[in-house]
Amino acid sequence: MRPRILLAAAWLAAAGGLAHAVQDGLGADVESLLAFARERHPELAAMRHAAEAARAGLPAASALPDPMLGIELRDFATPVSGPNLLPARVGSTRYTLTQTLPWAGKRDLQQERAAAEAAAADSRAAATWADLAWQIKQAFARRYLQAESLRTARENLALLDQLERIAAVRYASGLVPQQDALRAQSEHTALAAEIASLEGEAAMTEARLKALLGGAFEAPLASPAQLRPAAALPAAGALAERLRERNPRLATETALSRVAEKERALVYRNRYPDFKLGVAALQERTRIAGYDLMFEVNIPLQQDSRRAQELAAERQRDAATARREAVLNAALAELGESQAALDAARRVETLLATRLLPQAELTVQAALAGYENGKVDFAAVLDAQRQLRQARVALLQARVDQEARRADIERAIGEEL
């Protein structure tokens, strides 16, 4: 088979993309990485434990204070008998049992505040997972780009080897100048250096991805097989609504705003007194001589202190509300940018796949034919080869950009598309 036909077949095979079977093992797809991190990541586990602790404390939030039991020994020491601590040997003994009762509604507000704090803890755990999942998706997309770029570069290196051999044969036959053979060797060396750089970047990305997984292991990750299938993007209004309902950072600020509101209501309830009820029994020697019933109430007289506390609670509530609005605005802006970037990446992919890449393939075939017939110099062949490789990498980059922007949108709306 003639050299031109061999090279053209090789270019077309590379253009079509060699099929890769999905490798088994951790790292072949992003889903396996996410499942591993969800089970193993220590920071996520810590946030979950914190949320469980907040929920476990809910029953105690509205509980009454423990009652107090008091014993009072009267006339326990006399000049005749000296001191004595036995109730039957002193003048009299008073037994008191008291219970503090908050003003009506305070316990309900304490329960509601604790529930809001537990909701905030749950949302923090969800936000931690959303950020971690986003980082894993981004790292996987970057690793996929590097792996596919390496595959494309190695295919081009093999083709350059063929070109270098052809140029050497034609130079030995006196058909082309020595410059062609030297140019092929120079291009081969430059591409080999680029492959070495890509291999270093891939190793760093793998190390970063292992750190994101939270597991201490030495085994290499499986080679990334493929990106997730493309997902239909809902309308902008529907995505914004899902963001308002499920964004974990927004949910955290919403819960903290409720905490501040309940705290404010509790501070205002301090305008009203708390009560203390008690019963007492009086023992004289070995008999009960009588019973007492007690009632106490605190008098809220410190108005300056109370007004300062109320003002502080008001400002805390206002600050929490403002933080929530700031988080919402930032999330909506991020969502809009990600949608626009995803749409642009899809348009770029369409143009590259339907127009630029086929044109680059035809240019390579024409350059190879012209070089064999002596109508095109070697530089034109190398330039056509370089343009084809750049088109493939650009197409790959457009697909990876879509995956990265999809991860941005999923982090913003708090769920998978």
Image: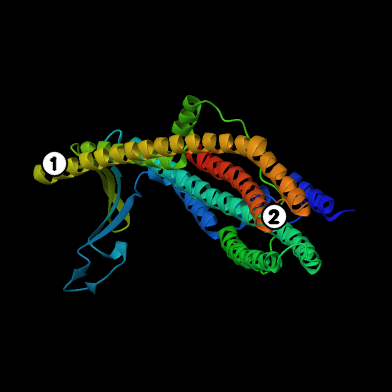
Residue at the image point whose x is 19% and y is 44% from the top: 312
Q: Is residue 254 above or below residue 6?
A: above
Q: Which residue is mark 1?
A: 307
Q: Which mark is residue 260?
A: none
| Sequence-earlier tag: 1 or 2 | 2
- Is there any visible trace of residue 194 in the rendered image? yes
The percent position of residue 233, horizontal first and vertical second, equals 57, 30
Q: Amino acid at mark 1?
A: Arg
Q: Is residue 370 above or below residue 150?
A: above
Q: Which class describes the residues within 10 Å of circle 1: few (<14), some (14-19), or many (20+)? A: some
- Dots 1 and 2: beta carbons under 8 Å? no
Residue 395 position by quadrant? top right
Drawn side of residue 131 relative to residue 65, left or right: right
Q: Quadrant of the C terminus?
A: top right
The percent position of residue 125, horizontal first and vertical second, equals 49, 48
Q: Which class describes the residues within 10 Å of circle 2: few (<14), some (14-19), or many (20+)? A: many
The percent position of residue 331, horizontal first and vertical second, equals 41, 38
Measure the C-alpha gap from mark 1 to mark 2: 71 Å
State the SS at label 1.
Answer: helix
Give the number of the mark in front: 1 or 2: 2
- Is there any visible trace of residue 107 in the rendered image? no
Q: Nearer the viewer, residue 66 or 180?
A: 180
The percent position of residue 410, horizontal first and vertical second, equals 53, 40
Q: Is residue 26 above or below residue 226?
A: below
Q: Which residue is mark 2?
A: 152
Q: Amino acid at mark 2?
A: Thr
Residue at the image point whose x is 80% and y is 69% from the top: 172
Drawn side of residue 322 relative to residue 15, left or right: left
State the SS at label 2.
Answer: helix
Drawn side of residue 392 relative to residue 263, left or right: right
